[in-house]
Image (spheres, coloured by chain):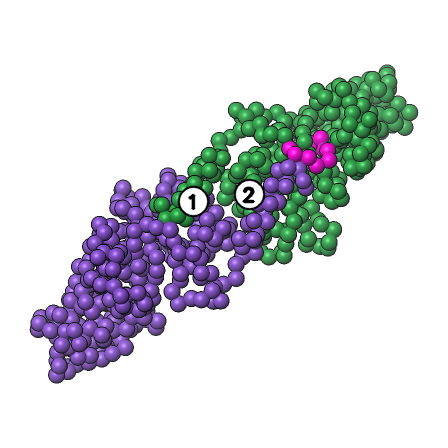
Chain colours: A green, B purple
């Protein structure tokens, strides 16, 4: 049954699987590893999976372009949930291997910037080669192709390895953000700590076009949490922007900003409104004066009175 | 009958009277000169007159503060019409006076910047003294108190004077704008070439407060035609702003900008939407992309679909 199946970026033993298992409903779903982000999202598009969990943003490297590009093009999908996972690596080795034995190491390329300083200090002469995923790197160590792999500590048991060193990370609080993506449907109701994702295409590239885009948010007091430009594939200089904004599409200030963008931009794709991971409504910053739903309703009443001359 | 009575800034023979007589309905109204702008507007407030014509903006000197302040405070009034009048002065003298006889000249203080250069060239030694109005200056010449008065040529006959020199003006196209003010009522329908006047109070004087005010207009593509700061009378640094914007309060872009101001500012007073004098709808500049009423309706439909997940 596709409704009970969740796809994720595999193979088994990736950080993505760990992130997926933090969702309560994962316990009652069949979790299916896929070979790539496009494969995971296509499984949702063609109905083989109800949803897919994929990484979308890395606190060290920024937006994950494969995921952004997949959500920007093709049949529309929507984001329903996000998961934040602190990323710390373990150095996995075959049992008995000592640090001085290690001549070659491997991991997914995204891991490298997060372990670079540690390697320079502790394995200055080891040779790095990239693997298709961190889990795949562990498998290659199991097979004897490399001496060690950087991966999640949880991957050790799966591949018969042992963690020689744990808690390796260059940036404090290195996190990866994952999103649970499904076919388009009505978003869940606002929680008071929500995020809205959209992709915005700029029209003619006149000076100030990006500023105009940002002003649509700023003038309604909507904070942006991520803005990432991506080429549209229609030639140099043609960009679209993936934007995460604070708030829910049902919040008046967010809805008004999105309508403003829809009016001035050739295309806007709504990617979903969903609860912010790791943030409670109490922790959300105060709204700018005049941007609550009540403020919008009061202003609308005032306009109606003014239009009638009841000033 | 007050409904048939229009007040204006007198005395008889002022530019204001000439401006009032350009309105077709003036022919069927009793026209009542008042001694000051506040007196003319109070006649409307207390029901003695249906409307009052008063000067509000001078193309040489800018906003006319007495009128702006009167519209900003007290019982609300609204503007229903504007009249533009080209201002050229005549030098009025008692019959027989020659230019070389003139030792003293008078006029309303607002006339001085418009005749200053002409006086320096032609009457370098004459002494200027201000009068309560240009018409009053003419009366004082008639009484022999001054040798000459700058006033409208039309005032000569009223005061038994003759125009010694005509078409005196320092600035090409010097114009004064007059507004017809009445008690609050529903504005007339948009004509396609309209203007909207508001007074906006800024709240706490944080850096960027004025910019935020301007952005509410700019982000909806609403051009401003006049912005004039006025002290609120509540201490140094407390200002309100009289603003004329292009468009009608029934235009979506104008209504949205006004609602935005109403949300972020402690007070906004709507002073009316009315046809622009001397401009036809054909002559109005093109709207910025995405700011027509249809664009607003389309964006609203798109938002409703997105909120339902129909992307």
Q: Label 1 belongs to which residue?
A: A304
The region drawn magenta spans: A179-187
Q: Label 2 belongs to which residue?
A: A257
Q: Quadrant of the C terminus of chain B?
A: top right
Residue at 29% from the left image edge and 45% from the top image edge: B232
Would you call the spot at circle 1 few (<14 residues within 10 Å), some (14-19), or many (20 or more)?
some
Mark 1 vs 2, N-terminal side: 2
Name the secondary structure under disc 1: helix
Rendering coords of residue B206 (x, y %): 40, 40
Rendering coords of residue B16 (x, y %): 25, 65
User: Which mark, residue A173?
Assistant: none
Q: Is residue A184 left or right of residue A290?
A: right
Subunit of label 1: A
**Residue A224 in sight from this viewpoint:** yes
Q: Is residue B132 left or right of residue A254?
A: left
Residue at 38% from the left image edge and 65% from the top image edge: B277
Q: Which one is closest to the eye, mark 1 or mark 2?
A: 1
């Amino acid at each position: 049954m596709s409704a009970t199946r969740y796809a994720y970026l595999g193979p088994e033993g990736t950080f993505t699987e760990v992130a997926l298992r933090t969702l309560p409903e994962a316990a009652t779903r069949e979790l299916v590893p896929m070979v790539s982000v496009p494969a995971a999202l296509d499984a949702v598009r063609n109905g083989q999976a109800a949803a897919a969990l994929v990484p979308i943003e890395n606190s060290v490297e920024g937006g994950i372009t494969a995921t952004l590009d997949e959500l920007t093009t093709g049949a529309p999908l929507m984001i329903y949930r996000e998961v934040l996972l602190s990323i710390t690596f373990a150095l996995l080795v075959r049992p008995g291997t000592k640090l001085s034995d290690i001549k070659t190491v491997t991991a997914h390329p995204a891991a490298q910037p997060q372990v670079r300083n540690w390697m320079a200090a502790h394995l200055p002469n080891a040779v790095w080669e990239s693997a298709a995923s961190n889990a795949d790197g562990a498998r290659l160590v199991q097979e004897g192709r490399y001496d060690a792999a950087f991966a999640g500590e949880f991957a050790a048991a799966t591949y018969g390895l042992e963690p020689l060193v744990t808690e390796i990370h260059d940036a404090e609080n290195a996190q990866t953000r994952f999103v649970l993506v499904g076919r388009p449907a009505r978003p869940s109701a606002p929680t008071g700590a929500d995020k809205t994702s959209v992709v915005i295409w700029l029209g003619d590239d006149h000076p100030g076009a990006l500023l105009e885009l940002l002003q649509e948010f700023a003038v309604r007091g909507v904070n942006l949490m991520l803005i990432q430009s991506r080429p549209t594939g229609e030639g140099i200089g043609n960009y679209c922007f993936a934007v995460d904004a604070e708030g829910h599409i049902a919040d008046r200030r967010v809805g008004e900003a999105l309508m403003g963008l829809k009016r001035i931009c050739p295309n806007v794709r709504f990617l979903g409104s969903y609860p912010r991971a790791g943030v409670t409504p109490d922790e959300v910053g105060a709204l700018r004066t005049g941007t609550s739903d009540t403020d919008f309703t009061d202003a609308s009443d005032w306009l109606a009175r003014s239009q009638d001359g009841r000033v």
